[in-house]
Amino acid sequence: MTVARRRRERLLWGAGSVLVVCYALVPVAWLLSLSLKRGADLGDHRFLPAVVSLEHYRAVFQDPQFAAALWNSIGIAGLSTLAALLPGLLAAYAIVRLEFPGRRLLLAATLAIAMFPPVSIVGPLFNLWRGLGLYDTWPGLILPYMTFTLPLAIWTLSAFLRDIPWELERAARVDGATPLQALLRVILPLAAPGVFSAAILVFLFAWNDFLFAISLTSTDNARTVPAAIAFFTGSSRFEQPTGSIAAASVLVTLPVILVVLLFQRRIVAGLTAGAVKG
Amino acid sequence: MAAIELRDVSRRFGATAAVDRVSLSIHDGEFFILVGPSGCGKSTLLNMIVGLEELTAGEILVDGERVDALDPKDRDMAMVFQSYAIYPHMSVRENLAFPLRLARLPAAEIDRRVLQAARMLELEALLERRPAALSGGQRQRVAMGRALVREPRVFLLDEPLSNLDARLRVQMRTQIARLQRRLGTTTVYVTHDQTEAMTLGQRIAVMRRGKLVQTGTPQQLYARPADLFVAGFIGSPAMNFLPARLAGGRLELPLGSLALPERLRGAAAGPLVAGFRPDDLRLAADGETAGLCFDARAEIVEWLGADLFVYFDVALDGFGPPDLPADLDIQTGDATRRSLVARIDPDAGVKTGDRFRLCLDPQRLHLFAGGRAVGDPRGSPD
């Protein structure tokens, strides 16, 4: 390969990467720009705000609706993650390590549940939840989130667990560990990248969900941010709440970016390297 | 310190028996070897002793107490795995300390024992390293160390050297032997390598297809193999086998005939297999006719410094090929001839293509009828 050709290739790759990054980030940048514009400048057709102002952020934080929604989002998404990961981990462990009849069927069934469109059950769920007193409560959202993310958790975790050398657990058992100790002290630390991946996926599902949140809540009791944003109003009936919506969207995007960046290294780290003869 | 006794131990998977009614006693402080070709059930048997595999039938006793229902953690045995199975997320120090932490030993005692084991295995400089940063030999020593720190009643080693290169393997072999003599802990060692078995073991049990074939000291197995399989499996290069038959009180071989030695008088009249080791052949002195002497032509000569192995062909004329166990993998030659090997004096100067005369000492001849050794103390074929 000639130097010129190699250079041309690198240029092409670079241009391609820039294109993809722009495609992904321009809407986010636009949102950020909108959130920083003054209310009067919102329709000025400029990409960068003429004057940077934090008035929409101030407005969002003064709105008690948003504070409640943020608290609901954090709590519900966090608890859903825990609720999906614990049974998910045990199920994945059983599927990978134990021989039992119907193992394949179970995996296929979990996949089938993941394929199920949420919109098809949201109506019946609405009626059911009202009957059971779960409507507009935290458990009312945590339950469907857990159900819909459990297959995802089981699949991700079983893929990671499958790669852990079986002999490590046997070694731990001979070294004097109970089955639970072997799981917690040897298998789980090695599965950590998988657990974090699954956790992020589940958390994002719950954090981003709009359908269940808008259908199964009615007040600040359990309304999460995506649903709450839809109820934003302008300061007067003649004003669009565009600025506040943009500011709120930026605010709920931040924790997600933070979580991913925080766990990224753990996900990438190949912890199992050197476990057995390599 | 413990004596292990297995009584009719079996492990079945569906219709197949991985381990079939094995009974043996391993003495206190003994270095005991389980050897056999792959798939013979030796690793399964080891896993049953440590408790990782359940018994279908039988009993396992340690110092007279039954342990086969105990959880592995309650058996006080340490094991070294073929893959080493050291924990990749822990440093060498944490790996060594892991079993002691689980046993809730005081921190000072853990430190003392970890250091002691590290010193014994020359791991002191590596204590803070992660397994990923270790060489194969170092990982192997960590695996050994994790077994040592426990000061267990029994050591179990499952092909611990099979992932090392040849030089390191020989080095670790002597180190393991030295450690075992020093600690005096009962040790069960599984291998498929007969050289490892012969050099390490105080006693060896040969297994084949889930069954125990013969148990004895390396010398006993070498000098008095109970059947064709043990005869062919133990010893390197393998024993020479030729078809044989009885005629008029004399034993006829493709090489000639000889008077049947006293020891082998019990032989039946059917087809027999005669066996002799490469070192039971020697170059004939001038004009020598004692025993069974024959001419041969050197096909291949292997010179190993102290030894000289000469491969030569023998025509089977009139004899069918000997009936040998297929899993021995020593079917050399075709239906009309067989390739044999002799170990001779390297100073004799035999070269490829040379003709030379060999003599076989009849006293060293093994005879097998129906696969079983004739004159075997355990009697006729079953």
Image (cartoon, coloured by chain):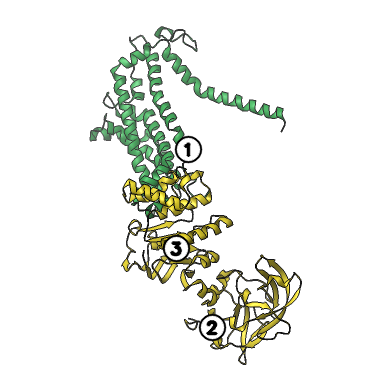
Q: Is residue B142 above or below residue A53?
A: below
Which comes before the other along the chain, label 2 or label 3? 3
Which quadrant of the view contains residue A217?
top left
Q: Which residue is mark 3?
A: B181
Closer to the camera in the image, B143 or B368: B143
Q: Position of residue B133 (x, y in %)?
A: 51, 43
The local crowd at label 3, few if under 14, some if 14 to 19, many if 20 or more residues have their Cα within 10 Å, is: some
Q: Amino acid at mark 1?
A: Ala
**Residue at image x 67%, y 70%?**
B309
Structural distance between the alpha carbons of marks 1 and 3: 42 Å
Both marks 1 and 2 on one chain? no
Q: Amino acid at mark 2?
A: Val
Which quadrant of the view contains residue A242?
top left
Q: Which residue is mark 2?
A: B374
Q: Amino acid at mark 3?
A: Arg
Q: Position of residue A200 (x, y in %)?
A: 41, 34
Structural distance between the alpha carbons of marks 2 and 3: 36 Å
Q: Position of residue B346 (x, y in %)?
A: 69, 70
User: Which chain corresponds to the colour green?
Assistant: A
Quadrant where the image shows the N terminus of chain A:
top right
Is residue B223 something one can see in this rendering? yes
Determine whether, in the image, residue B71 is placed left or right of residue B296: left
Q: Is residue A105 above or below residue B50?
A: above
Closer to the camera in the image, A218 or B23: B23
> Is there CB contact under 8 Å for labels 2 and 3?
no
Which quadrant of the view contains residue A227?
top left
Colour chain B is painted in: yellow
Q: Chain of mark 1?
A: A
Q: Chain of mark 3?
A: B
Q: Which residue is mark 1?
A: A269
Secondary structure state at the residue bearing disc 2: loop
